[in-house]
Amino acid sequence: MTAVVPIEKAKPAADVRPERVGVLLVNLGTPDTADSRGVRVYLKEFLSDPRVIEDQGLLWKLVLNGIILRIRPARKARDYLKIWNTANNESPLKTITRAQAEKLAAAISDHDHVVVDWAMRYGNPSIASRIDALTAQGCDRLLVVPLYPQYSAATSATVCDEVFRVLGQMRAQPTLRVTPPYYDDPDYIEALAVSINAHLASLPFQPEIIVASFHGMPQKYVDKGDPYQTHCIATTESLRKRMGLDASKLMLTFQSRFGFDAWLQPYTDKTMEKLAKEGVRRIAVVTPGFSADCLETLEEIAQENAEIFKHNGGEQFAFVPCLNDSEPGMDVIRQLVLRELQGWI
């Protein structure tokens, strides 16, 4: 007869590794250094992703390697130097994402079996390195948090692609969850409104118009079924409702277009020019598609678009910072993570 060993005596307690839950915050990415070489490495990884540039054929490879990676890195490196965190020798995006992870860990520290970490989709720290680190700490469950309020294949989906690629090489895979987009989450809309109102209250002027600028996307991607534009519209409409503004006072635009294809419109830079020429003198810009300030907000909006507005007759321009690791911003991330960890904690 086979003896039945009680479960609690099946293994010595010292041999049982406690189950832990990993939470991985993921943002887009950043060069490691603000020079041509660092930007070239980053751009090559970013622009070689078929989620970002869907046609990765021979013509694109020739353009990328023969033109873009020869010319663009030096110019973008100069832009990065304008905003670079020289104290830490890193981009603001890296500084802020690290702070978000540290503050989230502190906010949920009562769940002592939860380990919080952070990664970049492109550049460092890589998703692969942080998943390895979390599993090495005994995390057999993993919650991935793409820090993009609005879903798009070029952001949220490519994070999942890389996570799946890493897990595909593992024999002992952690159980996986991924947080959904939060483009119309009441906590997110409330945080945006609180942040915008607080910043506007600190200004020496009252803006005539607020522009909500989102990162652009080729129109053909939306035509193929990407929900990104729909999510951006929903965010803007929810924010208008919360702030009591109509479409003429809180406008939706798209920035950062690249190449020669038609992108989502209206374009932010063209809108800045148009409004200034029409007599608008005071304006504020908020970027609700970014969870952390980066090159596209600190340089493209706060500097380039401010110059476009003023060059065409505008007088006062204000950039509203992203939610970053502010109290309202961290409350959004904390609520999202705790909701998606239900059943695990």
Image (spheres, rainbow, N blue to C red):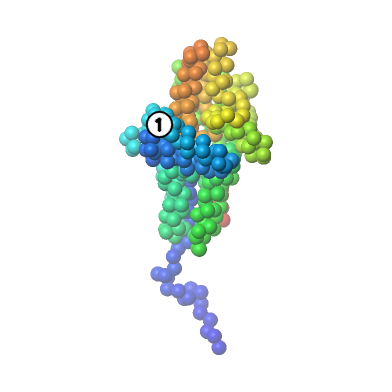
Q: Is residue 234 above or below residue 14?
A: above
Q: Residue at x 52, y 53 (%)?
A: 165
Relative image position of residue 15 (x, y in whole percent): 42, 70
Q: Is residue 246 above or below residue 10?
A: above
In front of the other: 17 or 293: 293
Q: Residue at x 45, y 17 (%)?
A: 204
Q: Is residue 171 left or right of residue 264?
A: left
Relative image position of residue 67 (x, y in whole percent): 48, 33
The residue that disc 1 covers is 74
Amino acid on which the number 1 mark rests in the picture: Ala
Q: Residue at x 55, y 24 (%)?
A: 268
In front of the other: 284 or 219: 219
In front of the other: 219 or 94: 219
Relative image position of residue 160 (x, y in whole percent): 55, 48
Residue furthest bottom in the image: 1
The image quarter containing residue 38 is: top left
Relative image position of residue 250 (x, y in whole percent): 59, 23
Does the rendering let one see residue 345? no
Local crowd size for mark 1, using a 10 Å CA cut-off: few (<14), some (14–19), many (≥20): some
- Number of marks in the image? 1
Provide the secondary structure element on which disc 1 rests: helix
The image quarter containing residue 54 is: top right
In front of the other: 8 or 189: 189
Q: Residue at x 53, y 43 (%)?
A: 49
Does the rendering let one see residue 126? yes
Q: Is residue 171 above or below residue 73?
A: below
Picture quarter with the N terminus? bottom right
